[in-house]
Every structure is written in C-alpha cells, then in structure tokens.
Amino acid sequence: MTKRKTAEEFRSHRWYGARDLRSFGHRSRTKQQGFDDADFTGKPVIGVVNTWSDMNPCHAHFRQRAEEVKRGIWQAGGFPVELPAMSLGEPFVKPTTMLYRNFLAMEVEELLRSHPIDAAVLMGGCDKTTPAMLMAAASMNIPAIFMPAGPMLRGHWGGETLGSGSDVWKYWAELRAGNITETDWQEIENGIARSPGHCMTMGTASTMTSAAEALGLTLPGAASIPASDSNHARLATQSGRRAVEIAWADLKPSDILTPAAFDNALAVVMAIGGSTNSVVHLVAMARRAGIDLPLAKFDDAARAVPLLADIRPAGRFLMEDFYYAGGLRGLMTRIAGSLNLAASTVNGRTLGENIAGAKVFHDDVIRPLDNPVSSEPTTAVLTGSLAPDGCVIKPIAADPKLLRHTGPAVVFRDYNDMAARIDSDDLAVTADSVLVLQNAGPVGGPGMPEWGQLPIPKKLLKEGVRDMVRISDARMSGTSYGTCVLHVAPESFVGGPLGLVRDGDRITLDVPGRRLDLDIDPAERERRRAAWTPPKPHYPRGYGRLFSGHVTQADKGCDFDFLEADGEVPEPEIH
Ligand code: FES
C-alpha cells in the first residue's frame, strides 16, 4: 500500500490528536465506550454507514455485515465507528422512497462531515440507498468504498421460480383476470422473498449496485454476490480492510468518478437491461461529481451495447443465476470493447485488471455479443412536443408492436383519479388508447413515484390485452414491464405540456424516430397553456416543502439545486 498521508493529516487528528480541552472530551468519551488509546491513537477512523432497520428487509443482514466490515477495519489497523443512516426500505416508505433519496444523500454527507471520519464504508443496496450514498460520497469526497447488500435468493412457487416485483405484477394481472386463485396468490406471497438481500430481478437495486461496481466504487465482483452467500460476509471484511488502505492512500471518489467511469456505468446498465430509474440516479451522481451527463448519452450507450444478461423482467433468469454464470465481472469481459479498461477503481487497480481472467460459465444467462437477449435497445430517450426536455422508455420491456403507435388519449389528472376510474366499465378505452397519467412527477407526485406502469383496465385484461402505451411524468419500478413512457420533462405539475393533454387528443409514440408528440394544433396548445393554472402545493411546511421548492426535473437527476451547487463546504470548526 502506498501511504500518502501521515496520521497527523487525517481529519480525525483534529478531534483526537490535539492536546486541548475539546480533544480531552473526544478521547475521554471514546474511552467511556471501553476503548483504549491503543484502539484509536494514530489510526484512521473509518465510518461504517449502515442503512439497517427493521423496516428494510433488503438490509436485514446488515447488523451482522457491519460487524464483519469492522473486523476488516480492525485487521488493517483502523478504528471502526458505525453510523446509522435512514434505511429507505422500498416497500414501506410512503409516498415513495424517491422523496427521501436526497434526504439520505444529505444525511450521509453531513454524517461524514460532522464526525471525525477519515474514510467510509457505505452499506446500501435497496433502490435509493445506493445512489443516495454515492451522491454523498461524491460531494463529501473523502475516501469511500461501497458495500452492496447483494441480491436475495430466487423465489419459489409450485415448481416455478419467482422474481421480485416482476412476478408480482404478472400474477396480479392473472388474479384480476381470474386465471389464478386467491390460494395461489397467498402461496406466491409466502414464496417470493426467502432471504435477506435486495430484489433479485434486474430492478433498480441490482442495476444501481452493478453501476456502482462499474463506476469502480466497490471491490471487484461485489454487486453479484447473493446476500446470504458466505462470500458476501467475506466481501464485507475485505471492504473494511480496503477502507483503511484508501484512508492512508487518500484515494478519493474524485479520483474514480471520471467521465470514463460514467461511460462504463452506462455500458453496463445497457448490457444488463438495467432499470430506467438508473437514468435519473446516474445523472444526479454525475452532476455531484461535476460531470455533465445529458440524456442523449444513455441513448447512445443503448445503441452501442446490446442486452446480454437474460434476467427478468426483460429476460428469464434471476440474480442468483447471474452470479453462478460469472456475475458482473464475467459480463464485463463480454462488453470489454465498449469499456474504458484503464479507469481507476477503489481497489487501486484498473477496471481492466479487475476483470482480467473472469469467465462466463452459462451462455444462456450471460449471452455472447452475437446472440443478445433482444435486438431492441435497453433504453431509448425521446423528445417531442409532449416532452421538450426528454423522456425515457425501455423498449426491451415493451410490446414491439406498440413502439410505433398513434392513439387517442385517456387522461387521468392524478393517481387517485386513475385508481378510481381505471377499472370502471364506463371508461371509454380500447387497446389502441394511450393512457396518460398527469401530476406524478418530482413535484407533482410528489417525489416522482413508481406509478408509470399504469394498470391495464380490467375490461381489457379480460379481453386478453396485456400491454398498452402508457405515458407519465412518473418513474417505473425496474422490475416492471410494458410500453411505458416515463420521466416526461418538464412535468405536468410545473406547466409541462403533459398537463395540457385532454381525452381524445391524438398522441404519437415513435420509438425508432425517438419522438413523442401531442398531435394538436399549436394554437390550441397555446390556448390551453394560457388557461392553465398551477395546482395547489402539496406541503405547507417541513421537508416536503423543502423538497418541492428545490427538486430539479427528471432530466437533471431530481437532485436539490442547492446540493448540486459548486463551492467547497468548510471543515467544521472544533471549539
Ligand atoms: Fe429493496 Fe426491492 S425492495 S430492492
């Protein structure tokens, strides 16, 4: 290990190393916990930021893993301190975890800043925890390593494997259509989530932990190890050891988060068929790192890199199968020609060195380049009169017949309106209709909830319809599928054209042409715009008001404008 720092140069030295009244307090209060001078003197203090809680089943193993991380920190001569942070368990946090991604990013950044932390192990995995922690790491810019939670084991029901989310949507539709029974549904509930770990489909969690590895912020291979595999416990200890080394080496996120690293992340997201949510998160992370990542880059990456990982919802297998097939290192060898192999990573080696010698063991799970899962791109970015600042669609998850489609709009003014009317026999809807959900964006949702996979109206389900064109300024769960146009910007709640659509307007979706248009006379559109009045704000006070006042639009990553701002935040005074 190359040592660039001396112990006196650590941030923690300002707390522990001085001989004054305040440092007396820091030392005596550390000793209050049973530690000795030998435990912390002259050592880097490593923050273990843990997003464990009883309300996050994806992180159920994190109390144990934190101990394993600490074991590695002790082994390498560091002083571990655990700092709990908001857990953001995707199934339980309402109205949506996305409302709190920036909250966690702020919390982690300020936890690191306000305490005597020299380097950090960031423990996350459930959807928003990964981007939030990496946004914090980019802004705080002290040495940091990400320790992903790992996917849970495959689900099981009646001889079938079940995938998180994807099979819930699938069998919910079958239940509503009368094709499975309540007893079947109960058995699915009992069998779909069998171990700790995040969703084991290629949802947002698997996408973002894979992106973190491609960015170079985890140890090699980290993102693919199932949470309950003993390799995962060893990964925790190795991450702890490495955190001590990067503290001494002063290897910071800014050394790793380069434009080349983000290009690698985009290539990997396309090859794994990653969630559309990754677009918002990667844009936000890049902007924190001072890197411009326009939406067009995602479209370019999707055209260049085909979908190779045959994982649900776009494919057949699950993350456990992906791990046995060679995992992300194996997959990266297949797209090595599209990667910047010289990019630096947190273990001190290049990405190319980290994937050297990796193998693919099952070609049906990780396909070769000449036999991709789909000829459609993973992500397409569209613009047009309905989305002047852009929107996204996941063509690999859509019915190919709908990728070019013109139809009459059926408009829902918000989620409650949609929930109240979608299954009504009176709803004037056919399979050719275009379902439009308004006021579901960053400010309007609020928090841009995952409502973008609008349910197919029950009467059409009974006729056998399983996909339709759906358009919203919301996001969609990475485990979802369908012809869903998402992230329309600017959103309807702040005056975007999506808010001007009325029942019966013709809408044209042209994915090959990368267009989304509202086919009405421009003069009529301007008349409607002049008559539009902003909806009442959701929050009179509190965090929601802060969020609504400062969140940016989807094409800018939905960060807070004041968190993106340039300028160095001073180190805290110690008085
Ligand atoms: Fe945590 Fe899906 S619920 S990753």
Image (cartoon, rainbow, N blue to C red):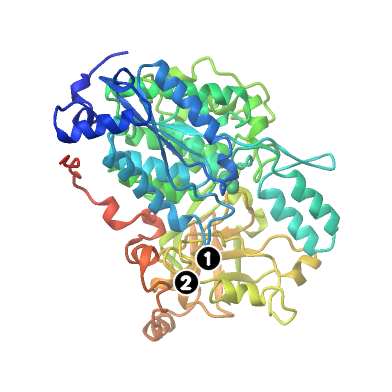
Decide if residue 299 is in sight here.
no
Q: Position of residue 553 (x, y in %)?
A: 38, 60
Q: Nearer the viewer, residue 317 or 141?
A: 141
Left or right: residue 487 compared with residue 306: left
Structural crowding at the residue carrying mark 1, measured as other residues with C-alpha within 10 Å and reported as few (<14), some (14–19) or many (≥20): many
Q: Are marks 1 and 2 in contact (CB under 8 Å)?
A: yes
SS for callout 2: helix
Q: Ligand 1 within 8 A of label 1's CB?
A: no
Q: Which mark is residue 498?
A: 2
Q: Amino acid at mark 1?
A: Ser
Label 1 sits on residue: 472
Total marks shown come to 2
Residues at marks 1 and 2, CA–CA distance in whole angstroms: 8 Å
Q: Nearer the viewer, residue 353 or 78?
A: 78
Whether residue 173 is situated above or below residue 573 in the rendered picture: below
Q: Earlier in the sequence, mark 1 or mark 2?
A: 1
Q: Amino acid at mark 2?
A: Leu
Residue at image point 52% right, 48% down? 379
SS for callout 1: strand
Q: Nearer the viewer, residue 306 or 190?
A: 190
Structural crowding at the residue carrying mark 2, measured as other residues with C-alpha within 10 Å and reported as few (<14), some (14–19) or many (≥20): many
Quadrant for the N terminus in the image: top left
Q: Position of residue 570 (x, y in %)?
A: 17, 43
